[in-house]
Image (spheres, rainbow, N blue to C red):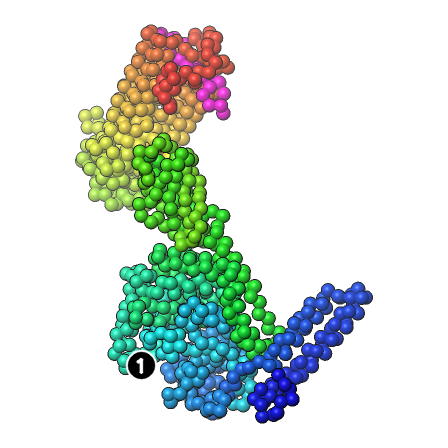
């Protein structure tokens, strides 16, 4: 520029005005300080003191110099606002009230008349204070909302705002809106101007377009309503209580408490077409909010996806990530809502992407939860993220904006020469997005079942992005594919994965792999992304929902829900009324009571029902009329007493056809179970048991007298880690062991066993069993002592067994065992004994020599006994 230009030249007038505002003195000051710092820095460095602390100051001053120069020659329109004193006083009072409450609340039409001189024009306007939080009012740079009157326009706008550039993070909002416009997303016009108020130069302001017809037309679209969620109730609640969002006790700050509103309602009401469009648009948005309509049915999916992706890239989630900052244009041609870029507060490093707003714990029906629930939108959003996070995207954006960006920055430098714009924040966000799209692992997979024709998997996303499952294959190339799209939602941050069971079918039914899940891989990709990846499939599923026992133990007591139970809270008893009762759902008896029943009581457990009691039992029948617990449909899961401190007493009872409440993975294995619950039993009969054990006692004291076990599918009596006695017990036709104890000390007297598919009497895992008078007939193995156990028997009649005695170590963590027998009569034995080296076997006090190296290698279905026992 020629500084000798005549005074009438507009550029010279502009420069002279700026110099008159003091910039010349700032230039002189910066140059002087820079020279002084440079000289002092050189001296100090040479002398060895303070050099490192001065150099940064020198560098900063050197950087300011070109900013000052650029500011001098910048171009900014000047708006001179004139307001009469009476109206200025009114605005000051509104500001004071807002500063007292912390929030500026709108009160009817609080505009005041004013005029604006712009170039050679004077424009009549209405003007009010603007902003929600008081950051818009705390300095002398108050924010204003301006409405042009009389059919005139200002910068081609009828409604606009001016505010301190800091409220939108200086240049970053300008970049954000220009980037949206470049993607054909509706964006406000936004630039920097010089504002003078009643003759006082307030410096540089950001001028921002408001929402009306001219905004839509400037974005080359046909006029249509502009919708928003009305936020007046939210701000009123915040002012009333001083609390934000979930902190408020009223829930008035929820988007569900907001009405759906539109800008310029007066114009809408005067135009029949706009009225109809508003009704349609509001209905669409309301039906989306209630979950009736999907994202694709309400919004322009590509434009919403680009809007969200650019908001992530440019760190502008203040606008896109808060429901009350969202603005939508209803396009009457496409009948869809389009986003409007507004109040992004861009230029911040992102910590979470917008898709995570849909994954927030405790907010299952937020705007973002609903919008990302549509897989079509989530897919398009990821595609947009992938595109804008490509290295070339930011470079092309800043190439396009190079000249206007320099001009806009120069205007800012005219007031803030030390302001430094650094695009590095956008590069950080780009890497954040790229990392989210390329996690080290995206899912975890486990097989439930595999056959040549089908594959069932348990899958869960373990990171924030949704995952699309493409298929799987076995190591010998048999491939499986989904019958329909399988998408796993992203994981909620700080929460465990959500498992999903999926079924895949073979592309070539009748293929070759055996039904074992080893060697499986699943192919997937982040939903909408280009790159596909693979993950090994674990052979065992880590989670499941089929453990009814677990769910039952988590339930509350429900005794009062059954008509055949009488609950006496005063006496702390629960009585089973006499009679035959069909029990079709499980009964849970809470702790602190006693469950009582007497003669004439019959519980028929069907549909997998059971009785689970945390209280002791007092059940007594008679010889003619015993208490009966049975299952007519064979599914009843019996009786379990869990953690009862007092002793249960059972007499004259029959248990028939019961299954166990456990499935091998959890629960107990008996048709009747006592866990950490002392018990006394007499005159009981167990018949037709369908469970692993007819009676299972675990970590309990016990006294058992005069009991009969008959026709059990597997073990009859199984005792783990208990202490007690068994007398006058009869075992008839047992599918597996008649009596098996582990970690238990037990005395046994007068036992009769006739028919045992595996062992008659078995002591294991450091048990001590003392037997007085036992008759054992037709047991596969008569007696067994293993794993540091001691079995002593006095008075034994043993006949018809494939193996008489087995003494050995089964488990490496235990040691050899001992079996001592006196007064033994045997007949019809296939093999008298198997004694492993290190273990001891004696008859009448005389020890016999070991005759086998590894006894266990001959048992468990190899030569003697049953497999897997």
- Where residue 515 appears, as percent x and y from the top left, is 35, 32
Give the number of callouts. Answer: 1
Residue 610 placement: quadrant: top left
Q: Which span of residues is magenta-colored?
A: 804-826
Our reading of the magenta stretch's main secondary structure is strand
- Going 43% across and 67% down the picture, which residue do you hit? 183
> What is the secondary structure assignment of the residue under circle 1?
helix
- Where residue 837 appears, as percent x and y from the top left, is 49, 13
User: Quick check: 723 left or right of 712?
Assistant: right
Which one is nearer the viewer's eye here, 287 or 400? Answer: 400
Whether residue 742 is situated above or below residue 55 in the rendered picture: above
Which one is nearer the viewer's eye here, 483 or 815? Answer: 483
Residue 456 placement: quadrant: top left
Which residue matches tag 1? 267
- Going 38% across and 56% down the picture, which residue do you hit? 379
- Where residue 431 appears, as percent x and y from the top left, is 52, 57
- Going 30% across and 70% down the picture, which residue do you hit? 333
- Going 36% across and 78% down the picture, which residue do you hit? 213
Can residue 704 be seen?
no
Whether residue 831 is situated above or below residue 314 in the rendered picture: above
Whether residue 811 is situated above or below residue 359 in the rendered picture: above
């Amino acid at each position: 520029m020629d500084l000798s230009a005549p005074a009438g030249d507009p550029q010279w007038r502009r420069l002279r005005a700026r110099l008159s505002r003091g910039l010349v003195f700032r230039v002189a000051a910066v140059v002087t300080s820079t020279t002084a710092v440079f000289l002092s820095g050189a001296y100090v460095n040479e002398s060895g003191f303070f050099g490192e602390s001065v150099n940064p100051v020198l560098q900063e001053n050197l950087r300011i110099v070109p900013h000052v120069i650029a500011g001098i020659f910048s171009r900014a329109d000047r708006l001179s606002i004139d307001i009469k004193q009476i109206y200025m006083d009114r605005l000051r009072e509104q500001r004071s009230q807002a500063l007292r409450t912390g929030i500026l609340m709108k009160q009817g039409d609080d505009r005041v008349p004013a005029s604006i001189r712009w170039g050679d024009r004077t424009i009549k306007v209405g003007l009010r204070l603007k902003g929600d939080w008081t950051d818009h009012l705390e300095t002398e740079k108050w924010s204003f909302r301006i409405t042009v009157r009389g059919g005139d326009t200002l910068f081609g706008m009828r409604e606009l705002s001016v505010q301190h550039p800091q409220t939108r993070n200086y240049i970053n909002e300008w970049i954000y809106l220009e980037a949206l416009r470049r993607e054909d997303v509706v964006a406000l016009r936004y630039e920097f101007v010089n504002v003078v108020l009643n003759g006082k130069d307030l410096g540089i302001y950001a001028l921002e377009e408001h929402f009306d017809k001219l905004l839509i037309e400037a974005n080359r679209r046909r006029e249509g309503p502009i919708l928003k969620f009305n936020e007046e109730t939210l701000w009123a609640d915040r002012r009333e209580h001083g609390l934000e969002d979930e902190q408020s006790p009223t829930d008035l700050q929820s988007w569900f408490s907001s009405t759906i509103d539109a800008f310029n309602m007066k114009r809408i009401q005067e135009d029949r077409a706009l009225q109809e469009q508003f009704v349609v648009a509001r209905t669409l948005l309301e039906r989306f909010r209630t979950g009736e309509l999907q994202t694709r049915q309400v919004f322009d999916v590509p434009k919403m996806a680009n809007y969200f992706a650019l908001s992530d890239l440019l760190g502008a989630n203040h606008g896109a990530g808060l429901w009350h900052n969202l603005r939508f244009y209803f396009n009457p041609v496409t009948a869809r809502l389009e986003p409007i870029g507004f109040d992004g507060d861009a230029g911040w490093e992102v910590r979470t992407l917008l898709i995570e707003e849909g994954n927030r714990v405790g907010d299952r029906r937020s705007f973002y939860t609903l919008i990302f629930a549509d897989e079509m939108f989530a897919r398009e959003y990821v595609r947009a993220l992938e595109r804008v996070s490509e290295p070339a995207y930011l470079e092309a954006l800043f190439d396009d904006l190079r000249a206007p960006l320099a001009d806009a920055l120069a205007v800012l430098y005219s007031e803030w020469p030390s302001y430094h714009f650094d695009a590095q924040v956008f590069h950080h966000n780009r890497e954040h997005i790229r990392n989210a799209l390329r996690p080290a692992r995206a899912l975890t997979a486990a097989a439930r079942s595999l056959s040549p024709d089908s594959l069932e998997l348990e899958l869960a996303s373990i990171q924030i992005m949704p995952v699309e499952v493409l298929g799987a294959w076995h190591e010998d190339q048999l491939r499986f594919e989904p019958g329909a799209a399988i998408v796993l939602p992203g994981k909620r941050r700080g929460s465990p994965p959500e498992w999903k069971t999926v079924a895949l079918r073979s592309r070539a039914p009748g293929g070759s792999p055996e039904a074992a899940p080893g060697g499986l891989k699943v192919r997937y990709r982040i939903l909408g992304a280009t790159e596909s990846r693979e993950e090994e499939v674990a052979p065992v599923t880590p989670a499941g929902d089929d453990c009814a026992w677990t769910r039952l133990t988590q339930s509350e007591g429900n005794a009062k829900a059954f008509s055949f139970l009488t609950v006496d809270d005063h006496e702390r008893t629960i009585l089973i009324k006499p009679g035959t009762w069909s029990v079709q759902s499980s009964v849970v008896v809470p702790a602190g009571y006693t469950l009582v029943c007497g003669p004439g009581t019959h519980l028929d457990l069907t549909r997998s029902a059971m009785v689970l009691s945390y209280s002791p039992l007092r059940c007594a029948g008679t010889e003619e009329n015993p208490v009966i617990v049975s299952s007519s449909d064979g599914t009843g899961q019996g009786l379990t007493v869990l953690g009862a401190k007092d002793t249960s007493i059972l007499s004259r009872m029959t248990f028939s056809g019961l299954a166990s409440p456990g499935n091998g993975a959890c629960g107990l294995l008996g048709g009747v179970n006592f866990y950490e619950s002392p018990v006394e039993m007499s005159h009981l009969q167990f018949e037709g048991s369908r469970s692993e054990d007819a009676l299972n006692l675990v970590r309990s004291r016990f006294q058992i007298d005069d009991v009969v076990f008959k026709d059990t599918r597997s073990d009859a009596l199984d005792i783990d880690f208990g202490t007690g006695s068994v007398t006058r017990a009869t075992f008839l036709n047992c599918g597996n062991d008649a009596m098996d104890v582990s970690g238990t000390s037990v005395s046994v007297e007068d036992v009769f066993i006739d028919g045992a598919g595996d062992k008659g009497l078995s002591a294991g895992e450091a048990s001590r069993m003392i037997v007085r008078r036992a008759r054992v007939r037709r047991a596969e193995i008569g007696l067994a002592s293993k794993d540091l156990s001691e079995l002593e028997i006095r008075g034994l009649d043993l006949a018809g067994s494939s193996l008489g005695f087995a003494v050995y170590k089964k488990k490496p963590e235990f040691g050899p065992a001992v079996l001592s027998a006196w007064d033994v009569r045997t007949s019809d034995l296939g093999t008298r004994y198997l004694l492993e080296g290190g273990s001891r076997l004696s008859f009448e006090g005389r020890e016999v020599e070991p005759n086998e190296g590894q006894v266990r290698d001959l048992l468990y279905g190899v030569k003697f006994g049953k497999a897997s026992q």
